[in-house]
């Protein structure tokens, strides 16, 4: 049973435009949510997080939105850059992190 | 400071063999978690160790085991290997337990191929 789902395996966006990556979860007890980015041949690296008491968190070009009633999380990247091309994993948890299956983002010129 | 170090980076085994993977966390980090990454399955949680004790375990068979030493280094072992165990095994460390610490710091992984 996949508690954290990323239904879009891939996304292609033009440089300078907005990238929106989505994530759904099933466990309403999750109280912390994170996004990780992974380049080939490297381990995932932390990008941004949000706790369940907030609905938005910004860090530079990256903003995470949390809709608890819909059990939905999204990551907005504005403006998108070619270096953002990577696999993005959302993760959620209480005492351990459950990861989604990832979305491969490609930013083209 | 040095990051999370995993060894070996690549290995090939045959069905029925066993394998041991090693992880050295960031200095000062006491929590070590292991994840299995396969195409289409994302990162599947294996287990977490803190202060030499297993604190959490994922839904994997008993063939998957691990341990943590007093210096926080961790090993995971997979016995009686199956073809489906072929995956990238990722180790992550954090200063303290729980996802609300913010970050897990991942190593580059050990890619296991079972023939």
Image (cartoon, coloured by chain):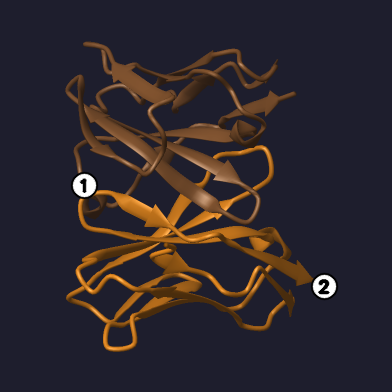
Q: Which residue is mark 1?
A: B98
Disc 2: which chain?
Answer: A
Q: Which residue is mark 2?
A: A109
| Quarter of the picture holding the C terminus of chain A | bottom right
Task: Say if residue B1 shows up in the picture.
Answer: no
Q: Position of residue A57 (x, y in %)?
A: 33, 74
Q: Residue furthest bottom?
A: A69
Image hue for chain A? orange
Callout 2: SS: loop
Q: CA distance from mark 1 to mark 2?
A: 39 Å
- B4 or A109, which is in the foreground? B4
Point 56% across, 43% down: residue: B37
Seen in the image, is B113 located left or right of residue A35?
Answer: right
User: What mark, if any, has residue A13 been given in the picture?
Assistant: none
Image hue for chain B? brown
Q: Residue furthest right?
A: A109
Closer to the camera: disc 1 or disc 2?
A: 1
Point 70% across, 17% down: residue: B14
- B98 or B5, which is in the foreground? B98
Disc 1: which chain?
Answer: B
Residue A85 lies in quadrant = bottom right
User: Looking at the image, is A91 positioned above or below residue B78?
Assistant: below
Q: Position of residue B28 (x, y in %)?
A: 25, 24
Callout 1: SS: loop
């Amino acid at each position: 049973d996949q508690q954290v789902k990323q239904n879009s395996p891939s996304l292609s966006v033009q440089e300078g435009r907005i990238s929106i990556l989505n994530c759904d979860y099933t466990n309403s007890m999750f109280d912390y949510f994170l996004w990780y980015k992974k380049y080939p041949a490297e381990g995932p690296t932390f990008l941004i997080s949000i706790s369940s008491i907030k609905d938005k968190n910004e860090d530079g070009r990256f903003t995470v939105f949390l809709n608890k009633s819909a059990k939905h999380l999204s990551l907005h990247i504005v403006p998108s850059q070619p270096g953002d091309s990577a696999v993005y994993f959302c993760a959620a948890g209480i005492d351990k992190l459950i990861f989604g299956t990832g979305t491969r983002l490609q930013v083209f010129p | 400071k040095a990051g999370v170090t995993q060894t070996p980076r690549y290995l090939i085994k045959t069905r029925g063999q066993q394998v041991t993977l090693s992880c050295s966390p960031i200095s000062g980090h006491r929590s070590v978690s292991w994840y299995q990454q396969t195409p289409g399955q994302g990162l599947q949680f294996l287990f977490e160790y803190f202060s030499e004790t297993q604190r959490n375990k994922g839904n994997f068979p008993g063939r998957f085991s691990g341990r943590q030493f007093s210096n926080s280094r961790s090993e995971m072992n997979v016995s009686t290997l199956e073809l489906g165990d072929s995956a990238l095994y990722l180790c992550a460390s954090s200063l303290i337990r729980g996802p609300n610490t913010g970050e897990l710091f991942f190593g580059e992984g050990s890619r296991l191929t079972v023939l």
